[in-house]
Amino acid sequence: MSGVSRRAACPRDRQHRHGHQQRRLSHRIQQSAGHAQLGGTNRAHRHRPSHTPRNPDSYPGLRPVKSSFKLLAQVTLLLLIATAFSLISNYLRPQRLPWRGAWSKHVEHRAWQAGLRLVGPVTVRQAIETGSPKLLDARPTADFRAGHIPQAQSLPFELATEILAAMQIDLRRDQTIITYCAQSDCDEGLELALLLRRIGFTDVMLFAGGLADWRAADGCVEIAP
């Protein structure tokens, strides 16, 4: 009987052990799946950015560029508004202001600041008739040959330093001199007068109107050969 009982019990024991092994295997599979899920979560956590990305406009690298364009647009708009306001205001004035300054006034102002005496066509005509003061044409040589005030001598401002140093022109430092150039908005005559003053000539005057004012006063013009 005992032998039968033991043989009868063997199948049940094997089934019990088999079920236990299946449960252990299932438990291990579940543990492995849990570890795999946890590892994936950790990897995702490791690769996650340190901060939550925000709007690209808030990135430091982009902010200055867009801000600069915005500032430039604002400044341009303000300049356009100011220009339009100036145009309208000047248009409504009883006496409108000129849009550009007179360079002739600038030349005369510089001469006045330097203490140079300004002369006109009348003084130039007297110089021609009496031979004094001496007239010096400060324009380039080609312009002088094309037409100049009678009895004037050519002393181009650009070459004046070399010509005076080489004594290629007969001038005395106490001699009265009048310099001139093409017209009232050129400054070669002024610059030549200032140069002569710097190197010791004591009596230098400026005909600021130049050849143009001389022609306007019906002055004759000589042409050099």
Image: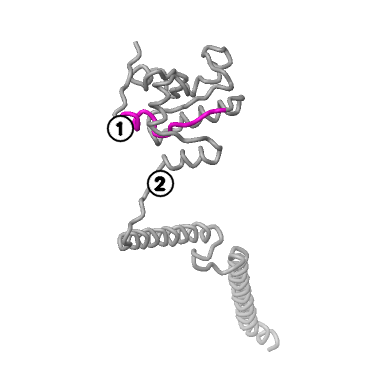
Q: Residue at x 34, y 10 (%)?
A: 225
Q: Which mark is residue 216?
A: 1
Mark number displayed over residue 1: none
User: Dot 1 surroundings within 10 Å: few (below 14), some, or many (20 or more)?
Assistant: few
Question: What kind of element bears circle 1?
Answer: helix
Point 36% across, 63% down: residue: 85
Give 142 or 82, whichever is nearer the viewer.
142
Q: Residue at x 47, y 22 (%)?
A: 132
Look at the picture and state if 37 lies above or below 176. below
Q: Is residue 93 above or below residue 185?
A: below
What amino acid type is highlighted by mark number 1? Ala
Image spot of residue 72 (x, y percent): 45, 57
Element carrying mark 2:
loop
Specify the segment rendered in magenta: 203-216
- Quick one: 208 or 65, which is closer to the camera? 208
Where is 158 relative to 112, above or below? above
